[in-house]
């Protein structure tokens, strides 16, 4: 389990993320008119500017140029329409395929803002988001309350630190004493094993 400071940092990051998500929802799904009107209110909507798909099949740009040259060479001297001239279909660039118009429609629809929520749904989600913020804030307050040193003055904390340092030195001295005792016991055990080995092999 992570220490209290790590948990506190995680909760603060989560709270910042919740604030961002809450502001994003309130800004996107409200049913009020924008505070700042668009710069050109008479401009046509985005969907009205998109050209619809043509019924004629698209042809490559190189083929369209060849057809255009043929039509020019086959034109009558009087300037009238040429006999047997072929009228090319809509020209599209090489990057756009047969679905270029469909992609344009999809891009136009994606650029439009989403539909606002109903007043009841909007109010319910507001309460849910506010409740989540309150719960996260209470978690942060609890983690702060259980931090060591909360409610103690600076002098008391310094005195406690000195006491812990003294206890740590005493534990370290005890550890070194135990290490010396273990070394003595290990030498005794090694001596016993050596005597047993000499007794077994020395009788042969």
Image: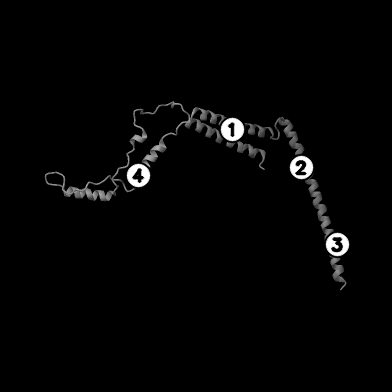
Q: Secondary structure at mark 1?
A: helix
Mark 2 residue crowding within 10 angstroms, few (<14) / some (14–19) / many (20+) = few
Q: Which mark is residue 132?
A: 1
Q: Quadrant of residue 78?
A: top left
Residue, x 33% and y 35% (percent of image)? 49
Residue designated by label 2? 168
CA separation in Å, label 2 and label 1? 43 Å
Q: Position of residue 17 (x, y in %)?
A: 55, 36
* Residue bearing mark 4: 100
- The reply to whether discs 1 and 3 touch (Cβ–Cβ < 8 Å) is no
Quadrant assignment for the N terminus = top right
At 60% from the left and 30% from the top, the residue drawn is: 134
Between the residue at mark 2 and the residue at mark 4, the CA separation in whole angstroms equals 75 Å
Spatial CA distance of label 1 from label 4 is 44 Å
Of the two numbered discs 2 and 4 on the same chain, state the one appearing first in sequence: 4
Which numbered mark, 2 or 1, is in the foreground of this view? Answer: 1
Residue 180 lies, with reference to residue 131, above or below; the image says: below
Q: Which residue is mark 3?
A: 192
Seen from the viewer's position, the closer of residues 175 and 140 is 140
Reading the chain from its start, which is encountered first: label 1 or label 4?
A: 4
Does residue 181 lie above or below 27 as drawn?
A: below
Residue 131, located in which quarter of the rendered image?
Answer: top right
Residue 5 position, x and y percent, is 65, 38
Q: Does residue 142 appear to the left or right of 91 in the view shown? A: right
Residue lying farthest to the left in this orientation: 78
What is the C-alpha distance between the residues marked 4 and 3? 92 Å
Asked whether 165 or 194 is in front, the reply is 194
Q: Secondary structure at mark 3?
A: helix
Q: From the top left corner, tell me how far across and down residue 172 is, in percent.
A: 77, 46
């Amino acid at each position: 389990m992570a220490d209290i400071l790590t948990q506190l940092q995680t909760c603060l990051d989560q709270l910042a993320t919740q604030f961002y998500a809450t502001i994003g929802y309130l800004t996107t799904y409200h049913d009020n008119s924008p505070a700042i009107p668009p710069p050109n209110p008479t401009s046509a909507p985005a969907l009205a500017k998109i050209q619809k798909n043509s019924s004629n099949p698209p042809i490559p740009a190189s083929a369209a140029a060849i057809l255009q040259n043929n039509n020019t060479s086959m034109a009558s001297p009087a300037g009238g329409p040429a006999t047997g001239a072929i009228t090319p279909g809509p020209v599209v660039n090489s990057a756009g395929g047969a679905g270029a118009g469909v992609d344009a429609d999809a891009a136009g629809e994606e650029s439009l803002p989403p539909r606002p929520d109903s007043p009841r749904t909007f109010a319910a989600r507001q309460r849910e988001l506010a409740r989540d913020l309150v719960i996260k804030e209470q978690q942060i307050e609890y983690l702060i309350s259980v931090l060591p040193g909360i409610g103690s003055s600076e002098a008391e904390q310094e005195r406690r630190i000195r006491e812990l340092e003294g206890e740590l030195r005493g534990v370290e001295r005890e550890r070194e004493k135990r290490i010396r005792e273990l070394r003595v016991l290990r030498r005794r055990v090694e001596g016993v094993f050596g005597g047993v080995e000499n007794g077994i092999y020395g009788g042969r």
